[in-house]
Structure formats: structure tokens, C-alpha cells
Image (cartoon, rainbow, N blue to C red):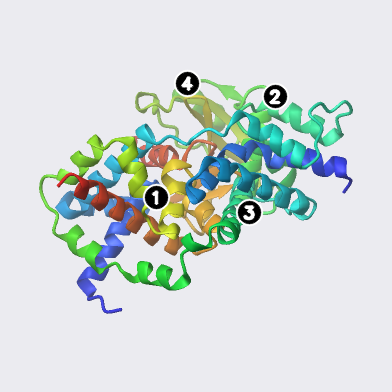
Amino acid sequence: MTVDVHDNNDDRAALLVHAYVDGELDPANTIAIEQRMTSEPALAAERARVEALRRALRERLPREAEPPALRERVRRAVGIARQRTRPTWMALAASVAIAIFASSTGTWYATMQSPVGASVPDAVISGHLRSLMAPQPADVASSDRHTVKPWFSGRIPLSPRVVDLAQEGFPLVGGRVDVVNRTPVPSLVYSRRQHIISLTALPNASAGSTTPQTVQGYNMIAWTVEGTTYWAVSDLNLEELQMFARLFRAAPA
Amino acid sequence: MSSDDSAARFERIVQPHLGDAYALARWITGDRADAEDVVQEACLRAFRAISGYAGGNTRAWILTIVRNTAYTWLARNRSAVVTTVDDLVAAESANAGQSASFAGDYGSNPEAELIAKADAARIEAAITALPPQFRDTLVLRDIQGLDYREIAAVTEVPVGTVMSRLARARQRLIEAIAADDR
């Protein structure tokens, strides 16, 4: 295949625009492609086309629901009785988990699978999951950053950067202390509609890869600023979690 | 693992994704009744495999089985429509035209306006006309909302391939929808 360098670059830039619209870029690439779209009309036009297409698909071709009888047909096929008179402990535990997290049946499974202290992402996600199971996701519940920040300074060495993003649709819920690698670290809790976002700050840490990742259905984004690595984790979709990360970084402390 | 445990795991792991399974099967087969058959067969495969399932992204796991089942099913029942590997390779490398039209587009954006006006039937026809590997990637992302890593797992290709397939699928779709109106 013969493609000259110019075409090749255009192709790569187009891929970045698509990934940008999909919320799949790390913060550095996000900023880079945002700047290129400002100065290059062809890239801005590609973004407009992709966004128009995504909107048209979302509005006009929503995912078709399965026929009501299919679920029962599948149950019969695998020999599962419709009424379980004797629930196994797993089904029972799962139904309790579902009652707690009406949003995700994967949550219970994820909790069972997270090895405690195995790695930073695992520890961060464990902290997030534990907080979801607690009566409150935050130890200090306040939407006022001037309440949340001092609460931390009385408890741990690192008092995190706390910003107010309520105007942007990410109200502060509060804060809590998580333990990552046997070190107490601050986690801020924000919300987006009914979704909870945990933002854990790790001092003297490197994020390694800053590529967004999905662990058991939870999206995670990490970035490092002045020696502190921030991990944002949520069941929120990646686009909006990326938006949250961008807003948090850009907001004045 | 007892069959009771398998049944409980199946309820917990597979059933929540039945809607996604059906939607993907419907796009691949293009037919609702066929999609139900495919989903049932895929669920049986998943049930047999579930005691050995090590965990991970359950939705990606189910959809991988559904996709493979759907293509096996098509090969068995409708061998004429199955795309050969040669077709796939030709489609993957045919990208020069895309970047040319992409680079030439400045200023106003007539395609975006045409897309905004296109009706569901026209968009659906354009998606159906896409080569299968492009169509699957586009449907998984833009209709079923999977992220790139999940799509890479389901379609069993690297994330870079997902990115290029998705961009080309969208560019073809945009061209097809815009061309309808000219």
C-alpha cells in the first residue's frame, strides 16, 4: 500500500478526532487534538460530521429491545426453572448486591474479584466499591469545599486540591480517606446525576499509563500534576468522566 | 461446580446482557427471528463454558460468544452472504479515498447537515451495507455503547484496528448518507 506521509498524518489525525469524540483519549492527547481542531478546519469538520452521525444514531436507531419472550426461551433452553424455590447462597448474595446497587449486577462480582492491595488501580477501585456499599459514599458529607478540605488536613498529611464543579454539573458530595498500599490517602466524592465519582489523590506516585481503562465496568482515568497522581473512578460513561477530569484540572483551586 | 451454581452464575452473568446480545445478533443476521436463534445458541455455549469462566468483563465475554455464534450460524444457514477473508483485506486497505475527501473538506459542513436530516430507514440501510467488520465495530460503539477495549475484546483485534475500523465505518456511513441526497 502506498500512502504518502501527508495522507498518513491526516489519517492519524482523523483517528484522534474520532477517539476524542468517543472520550477515549488521555488528557495530553485530548489537549493536543483540541488545539489542532481549532487551527485546522478539516479536523473541525470531521468532528462535526462524527458528532452529527453519533447524534443521529442515538436519536433514530436506539438499541432495539429484545422480544419479551426471549429471556424465558433462553432460561428454558439452559434448563433453569422459572421459580427457584431454593435459592443458592450465590443467587442470594447476588440479589442482595443488586438491591444495593440497582444499577449494576457486575458490582458484586467486581468486589469479590478485587485482590486487596494488589495494585494501585485495584486499591483505588476497591476504595470506590467499599464506599458505594457504605451507607454514605463520603466520611464527610458536604458540598462546600471549604468544609471538605479542612476535614482532611486534620487527618492525613496530604490535603487534596478541592474544586467546586457544581456549575458544570459535577456537585461535590464530600470526602473520605482510603488506604492504598497501606498509606491513607484522600478521596473526593463528586456526583453526576445518580452516578458517584471517586477522585483519589496519591502523593509521590506515578500513574504509569494514563490511558483510560475499564475495570469490571468501572471507568478509570489517571493523571499526574506536580507529583500527585489523581485517579478518577466511576460507573459514569467515559465521555463524561473525561469531561470531569478536564474540568477538575482546569478549575482554579 | 454443581449445576445449581452454574445456573446461578448464568442468571447473574449472562441474563443482564441479553438485550445487548440480541441487538448484536440482529445487526449481524439482519433478521429478528434469526437473531433469537443465535442468542439461544450463544447462551447454551455460554452456559456450558460458565464453570470455567475466570471472570473479567462479562458483557464483552457474552458478546464475543454471540458474535462468533452468529457468524458460524450464517456460514451454516446462509453461506452465500458470508464475506471472505479476501474481501475483508481489500476493505481494510482501501483507505486512500477516505483521507482525500476528508482533507478537502473545509468551511461549511453539508454532510453534517444531511446526516442530521437523514431518517432511520436510510441510516439503517447504510449500516447494513457496510462490510461486516466495519459494521460490527460501528454497531458495538455507536449503538451499543461499548468502549474501544471492549470492542477489541469482542472482535478479537487490537485497539488500533478498532480505531481505524470505526473511523472508516463512520466515514463510509457519512458518505453513503450524504450521497443519497445528491
Q: Are marks 2 and 4 on the same chain?
A: yes
Q: Which mark is residue A39?
A: none
Marks 3/1: CA–CA distance? 21 Å
Q: Which subunit holds the residue at mark 2?
A: A
Q: Which subunit holds the residue at mark 4?
A: A
Q: Are marks 2 and 3 on the same chain?
A: no
Marks 1/4: CA–CA distance? 48 Å
Q: In front here: A199 or B97?
A: B97
- Residue A228 seen by the camera: no
Q: Secondary structure at mark 3?
A: helix
Residue occupied by mark 1:
B128
Image position of A99 (left or right of B117): right
Marks 2/3: CA–CA distance? 28 Å
Q: Nearer the viewer, mark 1 or mark 4?
A: 1
Q: Secondary structure at mark 1?
A: helix
Residue occupied by mark 2:
A99
Q: In front here: B41 or A228?
A: B41
- For the residue carrying disc 4, how many other residues have a C-alpha within 10 Å: few (<14), some (14-19), or many (20+)? some
Of marks 2 and 4, which one's residue comes earlier in the chain? 2
- Residue B42 seen by the camera: yes
Q: Secondary structure at mark 4?
A: loop
Image position of B17 (left or right of B147): right
Q: Nearer the viewer, mark 2 or mark 4?
A: 2
Q: In this picture, is A152 found above or below B132?
A: above
Q: Amino acid at mark 2?
A: Ala
Residue occupied by mark 4:
A143
What is the number of callouts on the image? 4
Marks 2/4: CA–CA distance? 27 Å
Q: Residue at x 39, y 24 (%)?
A: A166
| Residue B2: image location, x then y, percent | 89, 46
Q: Are marks 4 and 3 on the same chain?
A: no
